[in-house]
Amino acid sequence: MARMEMSAIPASLAIPMEASADAYYELGLMHASGRSGPVDLVAAQTWFNVAFAKGCARAAAHRTELALEMSRDEVAEALREARRFLTRH
């Protein structure tokens, strides 16, 4: 499974600071379904965490569902990446 550092996102693909929680939720869906390339559950979980923190209640169900398919280390990595993103944006 491909891993992606949140800081490795090209500036042209970065979401504006005023982006809605739904925009982050959509990013999670893209990574979970493979619409953005190979399926990346860590990135999907990261974006669902960000979306939930920003107020998107729908993201909670997807976070829970994905966590069942992920190792503890992967879930922890997604949480770290989400925290890192949220503290910078």
Image (cartoon, grey):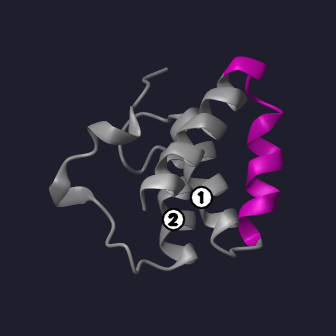
Residue 38 location (% of width, % of height) = 41, 33
**Residue name at image x 28 percent, y 37 percent:** 8
Three-letter code for the amino acid on which mark 1 is drawn: Val
Residue 21 location (% of width, % of height) = 57, 74
Outermost residue, left direction?
12
The earlier-in-sequence mark between 1 and 2 is: 2
Q: Are marks 1 and 2 in contact (CB under 8 Å)?
A: yes
User: Which image quadrant is residue 54 in?
Assistant: bottom right
Q: Which numbered marker is on residue 24?
A: 2
Vertically, is 7 above or below 63?
above
Q: Examine the structure image and report whether residue 66 is included in the region drawn in magenta.
A: yes
Query: For numbered disc 1, what is the local secondary structure?
Result: helix
Residue 64 location (% of width, % of height) = 83, 47
**Residue name at image x 50 percent, y 80 percent:** 20
* Secondary structure mostly seen in the magenta stretch: helix
Q: Residues within 10 Å of mark 2 (few under 14, many from 20)?
A: many
**Residue name at image x 74 percent, y 41 percent:** 66
Three-letter code for the amino acid on which mark 2 is drawn: Tyr
Please give the residue where the numbered disc 1 appears in the rendered image.
50
Query: For numbered disc 2, what is the local secondary structure?
Result: helix
- From which residue to which does the magenta span run? 58-73
Quadrant of image for the C terminus: bottom left
User: In 3D space, how far apart are the residues under numbered discs 1 and 2 (Cα atoms)?
Assistant: 7 Å
Between 16 and 43, the one nearer to me in the picture: 16
